[in-house]
Image (cartoon, rainbow, N blue to C red):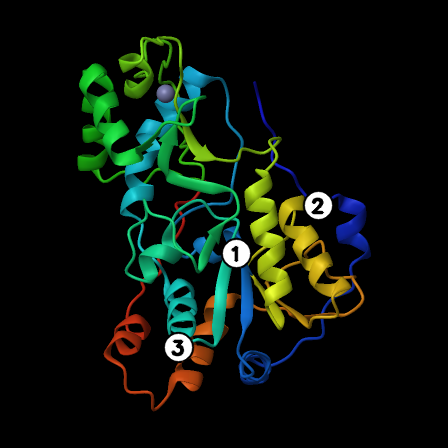
Amino acid sequence: MRLSVPSIPLEILNTVGRAQEISLKAAIERVVNFLTPGNTTVLTGAGVSVDSGIRAYRGNDGRQRYWSRAYMGYQPIHRAWPNPTHYALAALMYTTFIKDIITQNVDGLHAKASSLSVEEEHPQILQLHGSLHNVHCQKYHFEPRARYQYRISVINPKWKQLADDLENSRIQLRTNPDGDIELPGIRFDDFQIPPCEMCLSEGVVETTMKPSVIFFGESISNPARDDSFARIEACDQLLVVGTTLATYSAFRLVKHALELNKPVLLLNHGPTRADKLAGVDKIEMHSGQVLHAVAELLTAGIGDEEVDRMLSSGIVTPVPPE
Ligand SMILES: [Zn+2]
């Protein structure tokens, strides 16, 4: 099975008019004014995690190939740190300027920025495409990813050694939000995939575990779809950050907000699928430049240690070159 990454058709990109260029100061002002009424839902995508060294989403191959690469690629994802955009959004959510976050990202960095465990579900953060930090079998027995990684290490000592060697050599590997990495010249056909322990205990042997994420080509679950629509219906305005809206599950949320006459503001560097929709306002700018300043302005004078901590946190980790 080879899944390909959805992309915006070239004819759409070529017909999109360039958003009017504005200064950083003007961009900050526009976002501040947009957020000031409160009760905003924020929709985020891969662009938000680029500053944490996580490259845009890619597809994956068959199960053994997938798991061998995903095993190697998980450590950097597990270790990845939220960047200033994640912390700015966390601070704005903590101070209730933002009601909630719907994210297409599966890296758990929004939760981390709010000092939350990446394995748990959080009422204010909907991970539309699931999470890399859990795995499950076909019968929906869940297991924390870190524990499953440990079980993989135990039965694949050669791969464990390879992972440790790479870790110690400080080679920066290309990492994608699906936890896949580039491993040229490495054989994956002797890679052992641990079975589901719950299924084993019930006498069922042939079950396979997968990360609890929606891969491209799969549909999101009905509860996730309903939850995402309900969040759009409950908000007063929608801020869209760091996404081209290439996935339909995210794009239709923007359309839904517009149908309900809610203001929609896009903050993204580069064209998006929603640029030409009537009623959409756009700031053509990298989110990291804008949101941190916005959060500082809006939370100034609150004098809360947690806000101060969030706004002084966040490092930018460059994505390794191709
Ligand atoms: Zn199971």
Q: Mark 3 vs mark 2: give the one in front.
A: 3
> SS for tag 2?
loop
Classify residue 16 by image quadrant.
bottom right
Mark 1, secondary structure of its residue: strand
For image coordinates 29% across by 13% down, the residue present is 200
- Residue under label 2, please give it: 8
Q: Real-space Cα distance between discs 3 and 1? A: 17 Å
Is 248 situated left or right of 322 in this image? Answer: right
Viewer-nearest of discs 1 and 2: 1
For residue 102, which numbered disc appears in the image? 1
Q: Please, what is the three-letter code of the amino acid marked with disc 2? A: Ile
Residue 104 image point, x, y percent: 53, 49
* Label 1 close to label 2 by CB (< 8 Å): no
Three-letter code, disc 3: Thr
User: Residue at position x 43%, y 22% from top?
Assistant: 139
Q: Amino acid at mark 1?
A: Ile
Taking 160 as reference, is 109 left or right? right
Residue indicated by mark 3: 95
